[in-house]
Image (tube, rainbow, N blue to C red):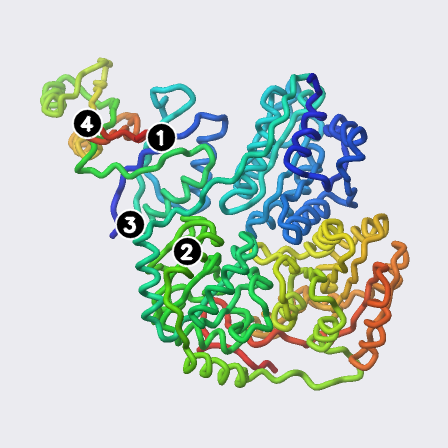
Amino acid sequence: MENKQIIGLLVQNHPGVLLRVTSLVTRRGFNIDSLTVSPAGFEGYSRMTVRLSGDDNQVEQFINQMLKIVDVKKAEVLPEDTSVAMELLLVKVSSDRDNKNDIIAVTSAYHASLVNLGEHSLTFRASGTPAQIDTLITELSTYGILEMARTGIAALANGDTTLTK
Amino acid sequence: MQLNGSQIIAECLLEQGVDTVFGYPGGAVLNIYDALYQYSDKITHILSAHEQGAAHAADGYARSTGKCGVVIATSGPGATNLVTGIATAYMDSIPMVAITGNVSNDLLARDSFQEVDITGITMPITKHNFIVKNVADLANVIRKAFRIAMSGRKGPVLIDIPKDVTGALCEYTPMPPRQSENTLFSTDEDFAAAAQAINAASRPMIYMGGGVVSSDAEKQLLAFAEKIDCPVATSIMGLGGFPSSHRLFIGTIGMHGGYETGKATDNCDLIIAVGARFSDRVAGDRKKFGEKATIIQLDIDKAEINKNVMIDYSLVGDLKDTLSKLTETVSATKHDEWTTQLAEWAKNSGVTETPKSDQYAHPYHIIEAVNKLANEDDIIVTDVGQHQMWVSQKYRFEQPRRWCTSGGLGTMGYGLGAAIGAAVGNPGKRVILFTGDGSFHMNLNELATVCSYHLPITIIVLNNTVLGMVRQWQKLFYGNRFSQTDPHRRTDFPSLAQAFGIKGLRIHNDDDAEAVLNEAFASEEPVVIDCRISPDENVLPMIPPGKTVDDMITEME
């Protein structure tokens, strides 16, 4: 079944580790639409979060191939129903005096906050699940999005489960 | 004790039991070669004519001895010349440590003379690679490189070392090599499930690959196959991992495998893949390969499970341990009806050999004649192309590690370097290189190395004056348009050999073959034999790419 799965990787932050991961993605023809890298919270390690499109076999292959990289220590699926996955959006919306209040009404429904005011634009910050962010973008596109930046997904398992255990 | 980086490299090689390295000096490795001069009583360095030859030699050394091959090259072109050799080793899971020099730290990233990003270049063709920017890290990186190359699914590792690091002083403390860890990852339940499937099968087949050789599991495989009375087919890489003379051996499987192994694949109810990876040259149509059979896969590399063909049961771990445990778990049985059926198929291969001619020798005849003259533990090396397939079809291998061929990458020009490595690693043994005129032309510069070290290599050039394998595909799939495959070069191989200081002989046809081969085998002198074969000789049978045994070609022209 074709679906999107979020996979958490724990990697040793040696030089070139990001290239090792991305080069493997390209070489093996995996299809990813988000990749984030950040410190893992303890020395020497980084955490990568990948969203992969593919069937169950491709997800299994992705994990097994990733674990062959010497610097990759853990690779696990973070299932949607037992994890929290969020991303941050900065979006600059085209605006004039007339529609300003409409736009603010829409964004406040998504708990987005106004972070900057331009002569002809409003810039908002929003965070939420990838699906919530997608919906907000669709709504705002009717007003004209001048530019936007998404951070990509950060995800953690629910409860006491961690990638290290 | 205080040593410089190059002395640390030498000490770490000795820690790992390395007594032989292959390589070629250059500016960025001057310090390393100075240490090799100092350690020359403990470490033998074999100088090749070209770094590619040195890399293939390290590969042939590793395949034929089971030890880790080591190759050293300088920065820039020295390093890039290793690339084909490293990729060849990577595709066939051959353990190798490649050490390259690089420009000094303060010159890195400035496009300095002979600078190249070799770790970037080799990332997709190594298990792992390192650049060591600090001499304090050097010893542990070398130790780690050997551990990675030799553990799990083996493979090449590259260590890039800037020149200043090879000259910098550092405290060195010797350390014994780490013992390998337990590598049995499957549970008792996994074994029980696999055993149940094996016990239930009435037409089982073992499909073995290079993993059997790589893990030295030939005895365990033999015991397992005999206990369940199961026919054994092999990939090209697995040859020698099961005795060819054994009643259960049915030959090679795949594109140029036998008719009977193709029929067995199609008609069996169970395939047990042992250290094999279902490559496209074996499973041409991966959706139809063994589609009527239950498939069990035994492999050290979990990523091989369900990669090309979907598997029903998998056992992940070292083959030696896995096969031993599986043999204990299964019941002894007989499959007389099935083995009789296979013997019937073997009689009906449908391939007719080309008639005898006084103009040419026949490749099968030459290979069989060599097989008769050679000792069981002589090492057979090939290049890539038609000659390689003919040898894989006809030569009878009774022991593992007596066979070096580029199976995965299909590297023309591999053979001579690999033969040098095999000869260096097996003193007192004869090495027989079968090559073609196309492959031989690629790296014949290494004849200089053969002569320098006086290596007992018998080189048989199956010379059809054409690029036979590609030409065969042009016959089959491109309407006989022989685009660039008919060079008909007039290279006089015996004279060429003599120019390098090596004896040269010629076989004109089947009638003079025995006499010439007898002369070559009578001494341990290196020799090049130019063996004239027909440009129209084909490799048959052949399953066209992407097809199954039902589409097997047994006749051409």
**Label 4 to label 2: alpha-carbon separation:** 51 Å
Position of residue B391 relative to residue B144, above or below, is: below
The residue singled out by tag 1 in the image is A48
User: Which mark identifies residue B325?
Assistant: 2
Q: Is residue A121 visible?
A: no
**Label 4 to label 3: alpha-carbon separation:** 26 Å
Q: Nearer the viewer, residue B425 or A148?
A: B425
Instruction: Using the rendered view, name the quadrant where residue A82 is placed.
Output: top left
**Label 2 to label 1: alpha-carbon separation:** 38 Å
Position of residue B375 relative to residue B107, above or below, is: below
Mark 3 on the same chain as mark 1: yes
- Contact, mark 3 vs mark 2 (Cβ under 8 Å): no
Q: Position of residue B142 (x, y in %)?
A: 60, 31
Please tell me whether mark 2 or mark 1 is closer to you in this view: 2
The three-letter amino acid code for the residue at tag 2 is: Lys
The residue singled out by tag 4 in the image is A128
Give the chain letter at badge 3.
Answer: A
Look at the numbered disc 2 and give the secondary structure of its residue: helix
Please give the name of the residue rendered at 71% of the width and 33% of the height, measured from the top-left corner: B74
**Label 3 to label 1: alpha-carbon separation:** 20 Å
Q: Position of residue A127 (x, y in %)?
A: 20, 24
The residue singled out by tag 3 in the image is A56
- Contact, mark 4 vs mark 1 (Cβ under 8 Å): no
First reached walking from the N terminus: tag 3 or tag 1: 1
Please give the name of the residue rendered at 71% of the width and 27% of the height, measured from the top-left corner: B113
